[in-house]
Image: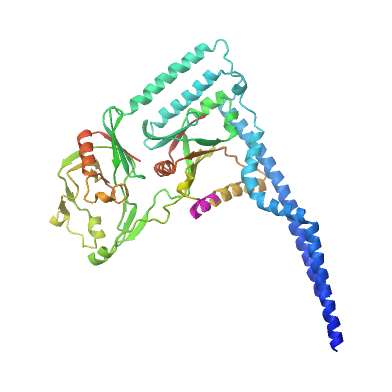
Amino acid sequence: MKQDAKKSLSRRIAGLVLLKIIPAVLLVYLLVFTGAYVFSVKYKLKQLHQTYAPGGDSLSYSAEEWNLIRQKSLLNARVKMSDSDSIGMTINFGDSLVQLEMKGVVLRQAKFDEAEISRFFRSIHPAAYEKFFSNPFSITEIEGSIVKEPITVKKAPKDSLEAAQNITVADTSRVKEFIEWHFQLDSTLVISFVQSDRQFGKTDWPTIQYRLRRHSKKLKEINQALLSFRMPAYYPEITVFIPKNEAKSFFRALPQSGLVSLKF
Amino acid sequence: MNLQNDQAATGAEANYKGKKREKTGFLKKNLVRIFAIVLFYILFVPFLLFATPWLAEWFLPARKTERQLVAEEGKEKAIKKLQTDITALERKIERLTPGNAYLIVNTTENKFYLYKNRKLMREGLCSTGSYISLEGEGDNKWVFKTPRGDYRIRGKITNPVWRKPDWAFVEEGLPIPPANDPSRYEQGVLGDYALALGDGYLIHGTLYQRFLGLPVTHGCIRMNDADLKEVYETLPIGAKVFIY
C-alpha cells in the first residue's frame, strides 16, 4: 500500500513537472526571447540608419532614382573589390545573379531562381543604403556541409613494392552530398546558399550535422545574451537557392576572408 | 485456504483493473492537453529559430520609396548625375577585363575556359591538384593542390622534359637521388607543350587522359593534346591565368 502511494505521488510530481512547470517555464522563455528579438531587430535598423544616414532621410525618391542609386552602389563596391588580390563575390538580387570576380574579371556567373530575403533589407532608407552597400563586405565566418579543402592524408610508402600496392581509390563516400553553406559578412549579415536541385542529393548526415552546429551556435549566442541581460545579436539573413555544382564551386573558391558586394 | 487464495487473487485483479481504468480515464480526459503540450515541446526550438526572426522582422516599417514611387520635380539633375557616374564606373570595370587572351581554371569542377578579345574561345576538361597530403619521413610533407589566384604565363616550352622533384621519388617509395641525377629527368610525360606559371607549377599535357575532369595532379594543370595546343598557341607570355 505504501509503495503504491509512493508510486502515485512520484507519478503526480512527474506529471506536474512535465505537463505544467516545464511548459510554463518554456512559454515564459519564448515570450522573453521573442520580445528581445523584436527589440534587437528594431535596434539594428536604428543603429544602421544612425551610422550611415545620421541626419535622417527625409527625401523621397522616384523608382528610377532609387534603381540608379542601387546600381551605382554595387558598381562602387565592385570597383573597390577589384583592388583586392583575392577572389570576391557579387550577388545581384535585382537580376538574380551571383558571380565570382577577381580584380574586376568575372570568373563565373550563375543565375538563381529563388531567394529568401529578410524584410530587414526592405526597411533600409536609400541614403543609408547608398553608404552601406557602396563598399564590399568582408567574410568573417564561412562554413558549409562540405569541407573547403578536401585533403586526404597519405603516408609515404616504405619501398617501391608498397608503392605499387598503394593504389589511390577515388573517395565516393559522399557522391550524393548535399551542398549547403553560409557566410557572415562583417559580423552584420548572413548569406546562405542551398543547392536548388534536390534530386541530385538528399540532406545527408554531414548536412544535418552542419545545420545542428549552426543553429545551436545561434541559440547559444542568444541565450548568453539573454542571461547577461544584453540585447541578442541579430543577423538579417538571405538564402539563395542555386544549382549544386555552382554552390560547390562558389564555396570552394571563396577565401576565408574574401570580399562580397551586394545589390538588393 | 484455496478459497482465501482465490479471494485475494480476485481482489488484486479488481485493484489492477481499477487502476488501469483510472489511467485510461485520465488519458482520455486530458488527451487534447497532452497532445498540445507534446506539440509545444516538439515545436519549441523550430519556433525559436525560424518563427521568432520572421515575427520580429514583421514589425519593421517598409521603405519610404516603396510607397512614394512618383517622380518629383527637380530630380532630373540628380538622375542625370547618377547616370553619368554609373557609365564611368561601368567603363572602369570593363577596362579591368583583359582585352587579349586569358585563361580561367575551375579547380572544383576541373574545367578550363580560354578567352580572347573578351569572347570564350574554348572550354574543356582539365585535371588539377588531388588535395593529397603526402607525409614522408621526419617533417617532410607535400600537399598536392593547385594554388588559387591570378597568375601570368612566365614561359612557354615545346617538348618539355619533366625534372622529377623529391616527392615523385617519395611517392614511389624510392630513395631521393642527388639534385642533377639523370634519374630525375623524364621525357614525354608532359605532352608536347608546357606553360610555366611560376613556383614549379605548369599547364601541360598528360598520358592519363582518362583522368581529365578529376582532381589527380600534384598541383599542375593537365589538359588533353588538342586543348593544350590551342591554349599554347593562344596565350602569349605575360597572359593572365585565373585559378579558382
Report the quarter where the N terminus of chain B lies. bottom right
Would residue B113 appear left or right of A45 to someone viewing this image?
A: left
Query: Where in the figure is residue A82, as x and y percent of width and height?
Result: 38, 31
From this view, report whether residue B57 is shown above or below residue B138.
Answer: above
The answer to whether residue A106 shows anywhere in this view is: yes
Residue at 43% from the left image edge and 39% from the top image edge: A258
A57 or B241, which is in the foreground?
B241
Pick whichever, B144 or B208, lies toward us. B208
Q: Which residues are magenta?
A: A203-211
Which residue: 44% across, 26% down? A76
Q: Main secondary structure of the magenta part?
A: helix
Residue furthest to the bottom: B1
Question: Is residue A123 depicted above or below A19 in this figure?
Answer: above
x and y percent of residue A27 in the render?
72, 48
- Where, by quadrant of the figure, is residue B107 drawn? top left
Furthest-left residue in this view: B182
Residue B54 sits in quarter = top right
- On the image, the x and y values in percent for residue B17 come to 81, 71
Whether residue A231 is visible, yes or no, is no
Residue B170: x %, y % from top left: 25, 59
